[in-house]
Amino acid sequence: MDKYLTVILVFMMVTIPISLLDPATGEFRFILPLFYGAIAGIAIIVLYSSYTERKERQKANAKRRAKK
């Protein structure tokens, strides 16, 4: 996974507890757009990185087969 995507992924994972708990008081709250936005962002990053890794692997395999 690209290092920039990893940083964004970590920030989105930190966003989930922030959307569930109020940092000042510690009591439970639920901010719906923030929570689901973080979940959707994580899913998009994971899907995109797996797609790009698969494409790179296909190119490497094609190049390796062409050498034979």
Image (cartoon, rainbow, N blue to C red):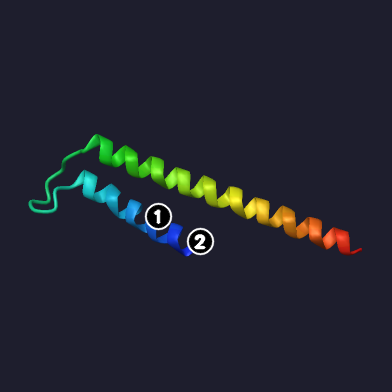
* Residue 42: % across, % down: 42, 47
When the figure is inspected, residue 8 is found, relative to residue 41, above or below; the finding is: below
**Direction from residue 35 to residue 2 in the image, left or right:** right
Q: Residue at x 40, y 55 (%)?
A: 9
The first of marks 1 and 2 along the sequence is 2
Between marks 1 and 2 in the image, the one whose residue lies nearer the viewer: 2
Q: Residue at x 34, y 44 (%)?
A: 38
| Number of numbered callouts drawn | 2
Q: Which mark is residue 66?
A: none
Q: Amino acid at mark 1?
A: Leu
Residue count near mark 2 (Cα–Cα under 10 Å), binned few <14, some 14–19, many ≥20: few
Could you tell me which secondary element the residue under label 1 belongs to?
A: helix
* Residue 3: % across, % down: 46, 64
* Residue 60: % across, % down: 74, 60
The quadrant holding residue 56 is: bottom right
Q: Amino acid at mark 2?
A: Asp
Could you tell me which secondary element the residue under label 2 belongs to?
A: loop
* Residue behind mark 1: 9
**Direction from residue 26 to residue 62 in the image, left or right:** right
* Residue behind mark 2: 2
When the figure is inspected, residue 39 is found, relative to residue 3, above or below; the finding is: above
Q: Residue at x 50, y 49 (%)?
A: 46
Q: Residue at x 87, y 59 (%)?
A: 66
